[in-house]
Image (cartoon, helix red, strand yellow):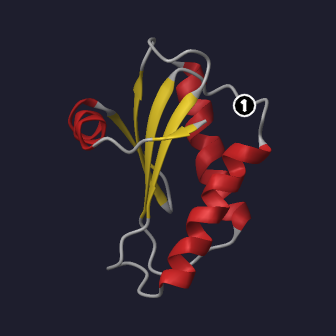
Amino acid sequence: MQMISSKKNIKFILEEGKKFFGEFLTIIYINDNSLTNHLELLISVPKKKIKLAVNRNKVKRRIRSFFFDKTNHKLKEIKIIIIFQHFEPINYSKIKRDIITFQKKILIK
């Protein structure tokens, strides 16, 4: 797994990507066959939603941990931007539920 850092890539994904709206997360993704068996990820927790940096970082760690813990997940050759849309930090199980719902939707297509 790699983090997306290029402004050009971010802009391209935001404009051309498909969107999934979960209860707590908005996920924008695009399939990229040029990636060799890995995924690229960007996690955004807006300052307007969660004021304290400590809490923003906690949410990012919880989202990131899902992708590190699940080494056998099926999301490969994909670029994902995850935007947190809730006004307070939430626990891992709620984040996990949104991401698993997203995975099921992607694997069906």
Residue at position x 57%, y 78% in the image: 89
Instruction: Kindly identify which residue carries mark 1.
Output: 73
Quarter residue 61 falls in: bottom right
Residue at position x 56%, y 83% in the image: 54
At numbered mark 1, what does the secondary structure look like: helix, strand or loop? loop
Q: Is residue 88 visible?
A: no
Residue farthest to the front?
6
Q: Where is residue 92 shown, x and y percent of the image?
A: 71, 65
Residue at position x 26%, y 41% in the image: 14
Number of residues whose C-alpha sits closer than 10 Å to that of mark 1, classed few (under 14), some (14–19) or many (20 or more): few
Viewer-proximal residue, 29 or 21? 29
Residue farthest to the top?
33
Say which amino acid is labelled 1: His
Q: In the figure, is residue 95 to the left or right of 25?
A: right
Is 76 placed above or below 29 here?
above
Is 57 placed above or below 82 here?
below
Q: Where is residue 91 shown, x and y percent of the image?
A: 69, 71
Q: Where is residue 44 shown, x and y percent of the image?
A: 42, 60
Residue at position x 61%, y 73% in the image: 58
Q: Quadrant of the N terminus?
A: top right
